[in-house]
Each structure stands twice: as C-alpha cells, then as structure tokens.
Amino acid sequence: MASPVALPTPTSAPDLEARLALAEQLLACDDPRPCAERVVAWLARQGHADVAACVVRAPGIGRLECLAAWGLSEAERAALEPDSAVMESPLTEVLRQGTPRFFTPPRTPLPDRACLVVPLGRAGTPGVGVLLLSADSAMLPPEVAWVSTLFGPRLASLLPAVPRAWAGGELLRRIIDTVMDPVLLTDLEGRPHIVNTRAELLLVAGPDASEGRRRATELNQQVFSAALASFASGGAAGVRRREVPLVDPVEGIDLLFEVVSTPVVEPDGREVLVSVLRNVTDLGRATQALGESYRRLRATEREARSERHRLDRVLDSVPDPIILSDPAGGMVMMNGPAEKLFATHPDSGEAALRRLRSNNAGFSSFLANLLDAGGKPRWRGQLPLVDPATGATLPMEAVASKVLGDSGELTGIVTLFHDRSEALEKARLLERVKEGSVHLEARVQAATAELAEQNEMLRRQAIQVEQASAAKSQFLANMSHEFRTPLNAILGYTNMLLQGVSGELSPAQKRNLTRIDSNGRHLLEVINEILDITRIEAGRMPLNLSDFGLPELLQEVMAEMDPIIARSKLKVSTHLGPHVPAVHSDRQKVKQIVLNLLSNALKFTHEGAVEVLAEYVPATSTIAISVTDTGIGIDPANQEKIFEDFQQVDSSPTRAYGGTGLGLSICRRLADMLGGRVTLQSVQGEGSTFTLHFPRRARRA
C-alpha cells in the first residue's frame, strides 16, 4: 500500500567534498548508465540505503529499464523491468504523478521491504526515471533530495528521445481516458498494455478493493481474454466484432458489451489489438423485450382463435343447462344439457315437440321478468320444466344475468338452470331426520334420568363401602393390638426359658421352645404388617421428620439383618455415592422400607450377592437407595401385582416362599407419605433392583 510523502527541507550539513566529487563525475559522464551506477554507488557508500536502483523509461510505451542497482540480485533487478502485460506498477505511478512516494509491503517494488521512490527529470516536464532505495520511514533524507535535484536534469539531457515518446504516451492516456467507452490496447492473448479509466473499472481491482470486486474483475478478465483469443484464432483480418457478457464490479449486475477489436502493429513489429467495448445491455434487453412481446402477441392470437372452442367445451362440461340469449330474448347459444330441454331434434315425436314448445314458452316468460325489471342486473325464480323424452316434471331454479357492453348497453343474457330435485329430496330427508332427532332426544332424557338415579345409588353404596373399609381397618388395628399384647408376653416367657431362667432344659425342650420363638416372631411380624397397613389406611400413621445421615442408617440396617445375612451365606455390601448429604425426613420409615427391601432380597436370593447403594441426585434434589440382588427375578406381567395388598407372585397354597404379601405394599405407601416412590427393574432368572426415591428434604402434608 502506498502513501504520499512530502519533501522535507534538508536540515543536516552536507558533505561538501562527497557532493562535489559526485557532481564532477556526473558532469564528466556522457552515458546515462555509468551516471546511474555512480549515483547508486554514492548513495550506498554514504549509508543512505542498503538497496538502491535507478530505473528509466525505455523507448516504447509501457517499458521500464533498470540502468543501475546496488544490493539486488539478478532476479530482483529483472523484477524492476515489468513486461508489457503490466498495466500499472508503483514505479509508473510515481512517474505519472511526479511526486515521491513511500511504499510498504505487499505493494512495494522491492521484495518484502519498504522503499522510497523519487522521480527524476526536469521540472515541468514528464519524468524520465525514478530513484528507488530502501527506507524505514516516509521521511526523504536531505542527501537523496539533493541527488535527485542534481541527477534528474542530467539524466533527462542524456535521454532526449525517451521523454518525447513518453510525453506522447501521457497525452494519449489522457485522450483515451475522456472516452466514455472502455478502450484497451492488448496483445493477441488478451493481456492488456494500456487501459483507459472506463476499462479499469471493469477489469482492474486496486489493492484496497473488496473481495467481491476483485472476483468480479478476475471473471471479466477471463471472459474478455477468451473473447480476444477467439478473435486471434479466427484468422480474419480487419475489424472484428463480438458480444461479450461481463459483470459490473460495483453493482454486481450483468452487462452486455459489443467488443470491436482492430489489429495494429507496434513500433517493435509486434501485433497488438485495440479494443473498444460498447455497452449494449439496454439494447439487448430491449431486443429481448421486443421478442417477448412478439411471442406474447402470437400466443394471444392463438388463445383468441381457440377461445370459442374452449368456451364451447367449458359450457358442455357443465352438468347444468346454460343458455346465452340476445337482448330480445332469442337463443344464441346453449350447452348440451340445455339442448335436451329446448332444442328440436329431427327424430322428436309430436309429444316431445309439445313439451319443447312448453319449455320455450316458460323460458320466454321468465326472461320477460328480467327485461321488465328495469335496472336490475339479475333475476332469480322457479321455472318448472318438462323432460321432452319422458315427460317427467323437472323443478328448476333459473338465474338470468345481463351482459353489458363497455357503454353499459345490454348485449346479451346468460341463464343458468339448476335442477332442484336433489335439494327437495334432501329437504324431505332432513325433515325426517328432525322427527327422529326429537324422538331420540326424548329417549336420551329418559336414559339420563335413569342413569342419574343409578349414580345416586352407586354413591350411597360407595359411602357404605368406605365406612365398612374404615370399620375393617379400625377392627384390624384393634385386633392387631390385642394380638400383640399376649404374643409379646409369650415371646418374653419363651426367651426367659431359653436363657435358663427356670433351670436347664433338655435338647428336645430347647428345640421346641426355639420353634415356638421363631413362629411367634413370625406371627408378630405378620401382626405388625397388618397393623401398619391399617394405620396407613386409617390415616393414623404420622410423619416424624428429623435430620439424619444415610451412612449411620445403613449401618443400623446391616446390624439388624446380621443374623439373617449370616444364615443366608450371601455376600451383602453397602455403597455410598459421592457427596451424599444429610437428609431431612422420617428416619424410621426410611429404615423400615430399606429393611423390607433387603429382607425380600435375602429371601428370594439363593446364591450370588446383594448390594445396597445410596446416591444423591442433584438435578432433582432426591435420594435414591437401591437394593440389587441376583435372585429369581420377577416376570414383567407380575411386577405391578406384587405392590398390591396381600398379593404375591405365587399365591397357591403350595408356594415355596411364605409371607403375607404386605411388605412391598407397605413400602410403596410409606414412600408416598415421604413424597417419593418405589421402582422396580427385574429380569426373571437374573435378579431384581428395588429403588426408593424420596426428596432430600421432606415436607409435611
């Protein structure tokens, strides 16, 4: 990217001896190349630049020649001499503008380094060359300014022919820039040498151009080069014309240009092409629009010719009779259904002719009503007609509408007939439906009254059942209490006897007392379960909320179940998930549920292991305590049944497992009281997982 630079006034004291030596060398030299080499070497020795070069205009428009260079390789020096395909470069910009410029990468004449470019020549005349040297800033050193002032006129005097050629080129450039059409000088492959301003807008994108403009200009260059290449391959001499589609890089719209190319010969003998692009976009659009209008006119003519045929087909496709009449009431045109009612057929008999005359008379009378109605545009009425073939009466509804011209005059009458036979039949059926609806409504009212009476009876029976259930629960609660009192005494005395309070017992006596104790405790467990279920049903089971920890609760459960675990010879383990917090709930009910689930797992597992896992679910703020066993499992058809009262998977008298069938029912009801639930996942023959889900902080109901 280039930025303009102002020429500063030298402030440092010049090296007079070095300047005088250089000035004497330039005055004594008559060849521009040695002069340029001395200037470049002097600047390098003075330490003003590590890279320097002198580039001049060579004979022939669009060519640059490097006379001398310091610190550049042969490839870098050749890069300063662009071929004719380059339309614009930083060096030619400075030559055209006549002012020093500071360039930075990527748009710099030197490879990947910033540089100053100073024009050389006489004041008031076109520049003959430039002085190029590496620099770190846009400030022009005083010695460089002095050298350009001294070396510029000397170089111009040594190259007399070059300025005249380039002056003509600048004048030619200004002339073609005033042309409104794009003008280009290109080689035979379409690579441009000189372009005017209009052509630059289409084919050249500056360094600051947007990506869209750059792509548009690249596309235009490809299309234009392909068109010129086809001109060259055609072999025809003289002026060549062709239409080329291009894109407007600014607006993005499609443009159409007529390219007029004329071959010319450069002074060096090479053949080039002068091309003028004429914008014929509007002309092409107008031609296209004219062709489209002509096609539409032809289509309209075809439609007009077939309009009558289409109208006839449309009218014949209508099942209702339609008649077009003149202003006096005479029939002009009718469709097929209307012909059956009003047209005379050669094979019509006398009876059919009489019916046709009757229909025509009735129709004429109907039209008279419309004509006598004044300004009314439409007339509707009933018109009974007769089928000429069978003599059957046809109840018709006729609608006659006036057809008005552009001036409001009457030009015709269109009459549409509609057979009302189906509508009358529907009306009769509707009347019968209404009668049936009234009868059905009366029956519905009677059935509703009977249903209300039955609902009242069911409500009373439900109250009686509820009262009986409450009495049953109260009775079971009382009886369970009465059972537990003597049973606890029996268990107490049995335990005392087993402990030898009344003396030593024989082995047979101990065995019998042990059986009494075991069966008594089993009976006490059954009574406790019945008492719990009745208390829950009666609403007498309170919630005692407190804060407690799950690790201590699981330890108590394992301690109470230790004798049963020892007898089962199963591997029973407990696990706590990460970050399990304290719980605010009914500790006793949580413990009872876990005890029941663990007891069931031990009862129905013959080998394997039982695992108790407690986890905290932060997303729902709930606790999940699961008991997993490797027991017999439960069939999916029975997984919901086992949670009902007094229900077991095997309810036969010969079942292999005992129990009342209340344990899981009590667990589910206690979980409901805690605001949670008990879930089951089981595979028959592989094991089961019962999980208690309850909120970490329970709320009183």
Image: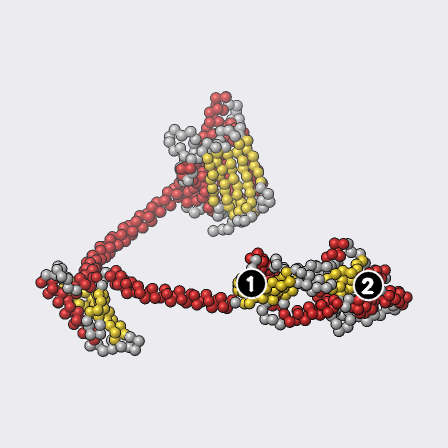
Label 2 residue SS? loop
Residue drawn at point x = 43 percent, y = 65 percent: 291
Label 1 residue SS? strand
Among all residues in the image, which is located at the extreme right?
A: 17
Residue on which the image places disc 2: 31
Residue 492, position in %: x, y?
Answer: 49, 32
Question: Dot 2: within a 10 Å radius of its alpha carbon, few (fewer than 14), some, or many (20 or more) residues?
Answer: few
Residue 143, position in %: x, y?
Answer: 83, 66
Judged left or right of residue 184, residue 485 is left
Q: Is residue 488 visible?
A: no
Question: In the figure, residue 441 lies in which quadrant?
Answer: bottom left
Nearest to the observer: residue 375 or residue 194:
194
Does residue 437 lie above or below 657 as drawn?
A: below
Question: Dot 1: within a 10 Å radius of its alpha carbon, few (fewer than 14), some, or many (20 or more) residues?
Answer: some
Residue 26, position in %: x, y?
Answer: 85, 66
Judged left or right of residue 57, residue 333 is left
Residue on which the image places disc 1: 240
Q: Is residue 409 visible?
A: yes
Chain-order first, disc 1 or disc 2: 2
Residue drawn at point x = 17 percent, y = 64 percent: 343
The quarter in which the N terminus is drawn is: bottom right
Question: In the figure, residue 164 lies in which quadrant?
Answer: bottom right
In the picture, the disc for residue 642 is none
Kind of residue indicated by mark 2: Asp
Among all residues in the image, which is located at the extreme left?
A: 350
Kind of residue indicated by mark 1: Arg
Question: In the figure, residue 531 lies in which quadrant?
Answer: top left
Residue drawn at point x = 74 percent, y = 66 percent: 162
Question: Total label count?
Answer: 2
Residue 412, position in %: x, y?
Answer: 24, 72
How far apart marks 1 and 2 lie (CA) works out to 46 Å
Residue drawn at point x = 20 percent, y = 58 percent: 429
